[in-house]
Image (spheres, rainbow, N blue to C red):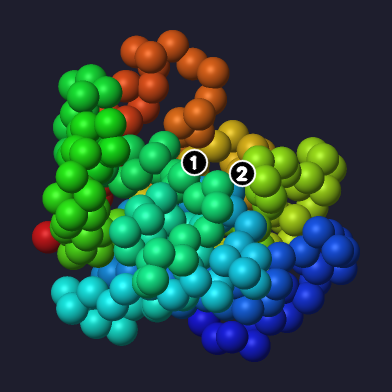
Amino acid sequence: MNDELLLTCYRQISGILGDRSEPWESVKLIEQYRRYWRPKKVNVVLLAESHVFTSDDDRSCRLKRRDELPGCPLSYARFVYCLAYGEQTLTAEGNHPSSAHGTPQFWKILYSCINEVDSKVSFSPILKSGTRLSSKRIKNKIDLLVELKNRGIWLVDASIIALYNKGVKPANELFNEVIRTSWNNYTKQLILDAQPNHVIVVGKGVAKNIESSLSSLVGSNNYTVIPQPQAHLPSEEHLSNFNKYNSICLANQTK
């Protein structure tokens, strides 16, 4: 995929969102993170809604360079692939964005893709509540992302532009239009080029907008819709959903 196609899609969505639009430079940065963590062979795509709005000020925060991650972007983004999102020790000179608590719910999804989950305690290695020493927790997160890449598991957002700004997303009609516009003009081609064995759609809000097209693209047996981890569901159902990620990813490893 090229930046020209991404920019064209961005301009179309900006025409929908107007002054609510995220800066182009932030969309480009998010894509750089996504490309950095793209596996050579994509086995499973996790298709989520979007990242969180990343402002010009957010991007101006620089990250500490990690020797074990050569070439990884060094600008801050409110995106799970940016390790500093939620980890204050990873920004340089203590210059960390405010209200940047990270996205523990998506770390749980990523963790469950390659680990069986017995209870909420299972997530301890990648959560502050379970591993208080930041250096150990960050190492666990890096190891997790590296292993996901090695196993061909890749996170993609249906919308190239942030839908959430300060915890608020657009009205349903606008939300649906942005998802469909992004899917039809960029993300669908991204999935087509990746040729995954299976796609896991994270959230029914995404599914209702792209499911028909996705089914035609990958086949009706090659995708699964799982509710978002913050959905109002019994804890037992959430646990079952986390283990679905594990079983699907395990079943779709390329030998």
Pinpoint residue 138: horizontal percent, then vertical percent.
23, 54
Left or right position of 138 against 17: left
Rendered location of residue 136, percent (x, y): 14, 50
Q: Is residue 48 visible?
A: yes
Name the residue nearer the viewer: 169 or 200.
Answer: 169
Q: Is residue 184 visible?
A: no
Depth check: give the residue in front, 97 or 51: 97
| The quarter of the displayed image where residue 159 is located | bottom right
| Residue contact at pointers 2 and 1, CB within 8 angstroms | yes
Q: Residue at x 25, y 64 (%)?
A: 149
**What type is the residue that disc 1 sits on?**
Val
**Which residue occupies 70% across, 72% down?**
23
Q: Is residue 203 found left or right of 126 in the rendered image?
A: right
At x 81%, y 68%, the residue is 14
Q: Which mark is residue 206?
A: 2
Rendered residue at 18%/45% (across/down): 133
Q: Where 42 sits versus 36, above or below?
A: above
Q: Taking 23 as reference, is 162 above or below it?
A: above
**Is residue 70 positioned above or below 220 on the image?**
below
Quadrant assignment, res 172: top right
The residue identified by callout 1 is: 202
What's the amino acid at mark 2? Val
The x and y percentages for residue 162 are: 65, 57
Packing grade of label 1 (10 A; few <14, some 14-19, many >=20) is many
